[in-house]
Amino acid sequence: MKKRVLFVSENVTLAQVVRLVTLARALENDGVDVHFASSTFPELMFGTTKFARHEIETLPAERADRALRSGRRLYEKSTLVAYIAAEVKLIERVQPDLVVGDFRWSVPASAELCGVPSAVLINAYWSPFAAERRFPVPDHPIVHWLGESLTEQYFPRAIPRVFRHFADPLNAARRHFGLRAVGSLLEVLTHGDHTLYPDDPGLTPVRAAPPSHEFIGPVLWQPDLPELDGLGDPAGDRPLIYVTLGSSGAAELLPMIVAVLAQLPVTAVVATADRVQLPALPENVIARSFVRGADVARRARLVISNGGSTTGYQALAEGTPVLGLPSNLDQYLATEAIVRAGAGRCVKARRATADMLRSEIHGMLEDGALQAAARRVAARFRALDAGHNFRAFVQSVFVQRALAGAETS
């Protein structure tokens, strides 16, 4: 009988969906029966996949974006109780051998109630075992009220209380179903029978993590779209810059970025993710809703992004430095890891100005050390095949489950 894996994706950003789609594709040729649960199945991401699809309720992206921008927590107990109840029904119907979630906080509880092993995908900079433990101030209304200086002083002291506040609904929902609470936010994000880090351990190291935590390597994705023409010679006098703020960056900055690029001797490709209608474009800027990001990053001298791991890792995999414009905490943590590696720089989205961007872009294009550091990271990424590592992990779970079944029979 075919082994079966159920992927359950939250839909806060495109990253959660595309990472799971990429890993699910890796199983398609392994004789595994793949099931995928999400609120939507966009052709851009799912294309010719043959997954069995199951529609479930997820947090609307717009609501999640508003919550993140206002500093409110994403979930309340009632939402998570409903999630768990729906997932239990789905698991009982699908009968998977493994359930894999990405930013779907309820999945470990649902799998535990059904006696099925769970795996959660989460970046290592969120791990309780992360070697680098500093939480920068995200773009939060409190910055406008208190100012940068006071917020920087207050924020570290507030973190424990804030993280408990965000985790409380999940712990309450678990208790509702007779399960134990799992702790604060970092424990909630990484809780599962298995925790998979889609990262390079050299970029986001952890210390003293249990064996159930493992690195599989960056999970890279680009849409199946035609290649762009007219990008010029990568080694030419007009360097190529790739710009995308993704589905969760400060898209309101795109018009200003385009205006800055119009004044520079560069060619630029801008992917808007359909979040902004740009005015008439200058001759040196090409704009599309989506592009083949890896292909463009490979030809680019610089990638400007929200600093998050999706585009950031895509750029680094091609040996291209990153200018991160982070706004939420996840983006700040990813950007800081890239900056520590010497492969990028950071401009806080809330503080970005045209002059600041112009100066950073000019400096980064001339910085050979940045280019060299990005190439070093790319070499490490090449040694990490996330698809291969994930397949090996899944097979190990199947073996463990078979052995456990044999012992109890």
Image (tube, rainbow, N blue to C red):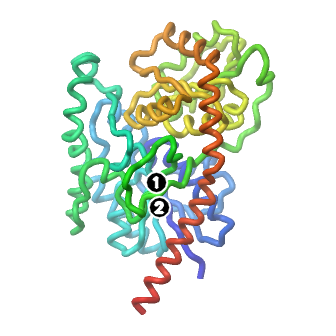
- List the single residue furthest toward the bottom: 409
Q: What residue do we see at 35% from left, 50% from top?
A: 129
- In the image, residue 405 lies at what x, y percent? 44, 85
Q: Earlier in the sequence, mark 2 or mark 1?
A: 2
**Height in image: 352 above or below 21?**
above
**Height in image: 371 above or below 313?**
above
Quarter occupied by the C terminus = bottom left
How many angstroms separate mark 2 from mark 1 (CA)? 8 Å
Image quadrant where residue 177 sits: bottom left
Image quadrant where residue 235 sits: top right
Q: Secondary structure at mark 1?
A: strand
Q: Along the line of sight, which residue is nearer the eye, 342 or 335?
A: 342
The answer to whether 213 appears left or right of 167 in the picture is right
Q: Along the line of sight, which residue is nearer the eye, 340 or 304?
A: 340
Instruction: Kindly indicate whether the residue at mark 1 contacts the one at mark 2 (C-beta within 8 angstroms).
Output: yes
- In the image, residue 248 lies at what x, y percent? 46, 34
Q: What residue do we see at 60% from left, 63% from top?
A: 51
Quarter occupied by the N terminus = bottom right
Residue where numbered disc 2 is placed: 100
- In the image, residue 178 lies at what x, y percent? 21, 69
Image quadrant where residue 119 sits: bottom left
Residue 295 is labelled as none
Q: Say which of marks 2 and 1 sits in front.
A: 1
The answer to whether 211 appears left or right of 77 in the picture is right
Q: Amino acid at mark 2?
A: Val
Residue where numbered disc 1 is placed: 121
Q: Amino acid at mark 1?
A: Leu
Q: What residue do we see at 61% from left, 71% from top?
A: 32
The answer to whether 331 appears left or right of 237 in the picture is left
